[in-house]
Amino acid sequence: MNRDSSSPRDGVSRRGFLKLGFWGATALTLGAGGATLLTGCSGDPGPASGYQHLRERDLELLRPLMAPLLAGGLDAVAGAGPDDALKAFDRLLAGGSEGARGQLFQLLDLLQLGAARWWVTGTWAHFADQDEAQLQRTLAEWSGSDNGFAQLAFKGLTQPLMMAWYVTPDAGLGTGYPGPPLNLAARPE
């Protein structure tokens, strides 16, 4: 009788055991690699210099979106730039709950991955690698997407960004809003 041959009633063959081991190791490797992509290779580096919450990678992702997203709002304030809008957004985040900030940072982390960015926004290209016309197209396609998650992500990111900018006194005046009415009854005579 040949000892190397096996019949179905003998259990797993040596070859079958090696195949199982190979595919199991492959699955573990891919799972660990995928987890690394989703959680980051290292610990959270903390906020960028001069910010309370936004990280450097968040600034790199969002900075190119500020001018097309605010559609002239930056130009309406003398000397304002994307970093001014990002600082306003950071101040808004300081007033939010830890859970809301955590969800926003999960979305920003997701947008760092090319495949996820394509699924959510419709473009593989990083926002920093797009010119202004491409960014306008990306924002238009993203806002009009049939993907419910993409619409939710667009609104969840852009509405707080715009709100943070337009509640700053200088940017608010650029919209034509004169400010709150004066309370004449409370004025001392």
Image: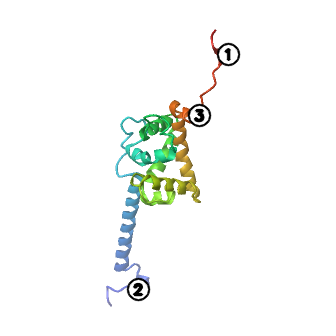
Say which quarter of the image contains residue 53. top left
Q: Name the N-terminal-most of marks 2 and 1.
A: 2
What numbered label is drawn on residue 7?
Answer: 2
**Image height of 111 relative to 179, above or below:** below
Viewer-nearest residue: 118 or 53: 118
Quarter of the image with the N terminus is bottom left
Quadrant location of the C terminus?
A: top right
Under circle 1, the secondary element is: helix
Q: Is residue 130 above or below residue 184?
A: below
Label 1 or label 3, whichever comes before in sequence order: 3
Asked if the residue at tag 3 contacts the one at tag 1, i.e. Cβ–Cβ closer than 8 Å, the answer is: no
Residue assigned mark 1: 185
How far separated are the C-alphas under marks 2 and 1? 97 Å
Q: Earlier in the sequence, mark 3 or mark 2?
A: 2
Question: Which residue is the site of mark 3?
Answer: 176
Counting from the top left corner in percent of width and height, residue 4 is at: 32, 85
Residue 69 picture location, percent across and down: 51, 46
- Could you say which is closer to the camera, residue 5 or residue 71? 71
What amino acid type should be assigned to the residue bearing mark 3? Answer: Gly
